[in-house]
Image (tube, helix red, strand yellow):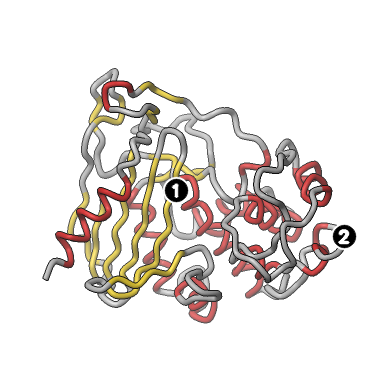
């Protein structure tokens, strides 16, 4: 867990076990799979490409991914970023094995809604953003992140997917009670994991990343405002936008897997950043978050 104010660290510490079998303790540097927090990195990559003039956020996605039938042909990059593209109905199975197969499977589903008409949070849109990143940059998604985000910011503890040669990596656990927790290992990655998930990192690197955003190190202030402010009601690029009585405006981005949970809460009005990760899925994230907020913002 990490807490900062005005980018000065107030608290950074680990709790519990990174490996319950070996009784290895978590610490502030322990690495976790952070699931949908990956979406923030995808947003930054897209904004970088827009800043370079390689794409426009208003471009229709078929400009880069081939023809879509009506009304899908009206879906834009902006629609994907804020989950209003309406391309895939809930529950439809897509083919995640390769970029080509994924795009084609999206084209074959019936539309859920007209682009721009309806909000529904979906991972598929962010996988399509990863496809656009690859098509435009000529790099794999993970190589783009490494070249344009990880290395420039010296995020030495951050990788995409692979834990090979990494030390201090938390084992994730699944189960409904503390006594029933069992080690769970993430299945082998497929192409379609790119975009919405897959980053492995720690709270320190995530703090470096957020601070770099704030200071304009990897995107311009104009781009940053799209991540800080609502583009549709309750939704900025990559962040949910909340307003809380004692805390003010909050940018929230969480992640969940069967064996990990993670949360970023950026309290804009007070410039407090809270980042924490959990290596089980006992549904403790909201309780932990609520408890920390009570301590931070009690009257």
Can residue 52 be seen here? The reply is yes
Residue at left offset 71%, top offset 75%: 58
Estimate the x, y position of residue 16 in percent, counting from the top left. Answer: 22, 33
Point out residue 229 in the picture as x, y percentages from the top left corner. 47, 77
Residue at 44 percent across and 40 percent down: it is: 33
Residue that carries the numbered disc 1 in the rendered image: 255
Q: Quadrant of residue 75?
A: bottom right
Callout 2 secondary element: loop
- What residue is shown at x 49% (from left), y 71% (from top)? 227
Compared to residue 280, the image places residue 142 above or below, namely below
Residue 20 lies, with reference to residue 272, above or below; the image says above
Q: Badge 2 is on which residue?
A: 69
Local crowd size for mark 2, using a 10 Å CA cut-off: few (<14), some (14–19), many (≥20) = few
Secondary element at tag 1: strand
Residue projecting furthest to the bottom: 222
Can residue 63 be seen in this snapshot? no
In the image, residue 136 lies at what x, y percent? 74, 61
């Amino acid at each position: 867990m990490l807490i900062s104010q005005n980018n000065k660290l107030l608290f950074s510490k680990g709790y519990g076990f990174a490996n319950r079998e070996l009784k290895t303790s978590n610490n502030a540097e322990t690495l976790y799979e952070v699931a949908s927090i990956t979406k923030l990195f995808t947003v930054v990559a897209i904004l970088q490409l827009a800043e370079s003039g390689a794409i426009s956020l208003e471009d229709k996605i078929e400009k880069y991914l081939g023809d879509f039938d009506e009304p899908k042909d009206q879906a834009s990059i902006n629609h994907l970023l804020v989950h209003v593209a309406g391309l895939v109905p809930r529950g439809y199975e897509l083919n995640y094995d390769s970029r080509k197969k994924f795009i084609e499977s999206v084209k074959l589903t019936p539309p859920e809604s007209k682009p721009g008409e309806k909000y529904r949070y979906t991972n598929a849109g962010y996988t399509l953003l990863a496809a656009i990143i690859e098509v435009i940059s000529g790099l794999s998604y993970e190589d783009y992140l490494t070249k344009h985000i990880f290395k420039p910011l010296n995020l030495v503890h951050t990788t995409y997917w692979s834990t090979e040669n990494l030390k201090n990596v938390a084992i994730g656990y699944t189960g409904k009670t503390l006594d029933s927790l069992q080690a769970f290992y993430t299945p082998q990655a497929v192409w379609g994991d790119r975009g919405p998930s897959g980053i492995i990192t720690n709270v320190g690197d995530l703090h470096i990343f957020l601070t770099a955003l704030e200071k304009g190190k990897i995107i311009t202030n104009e781009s940053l405002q799209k991540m800080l402010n609502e583009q549709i009601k309750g939704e900025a690029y990559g962040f949910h936008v909340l307003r809380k009585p004692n805390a003010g405006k909050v940018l929230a981005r969480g992640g969940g897997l069967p064996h990990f949970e993670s949360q970023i809460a950026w309290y804009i009005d007070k410039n407090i950043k809270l980042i924490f990760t959990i290596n089980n899925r006992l549904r403790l994230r909201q309780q932990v978050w609520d408890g920390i907020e009570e301590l931070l913002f009690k009257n």
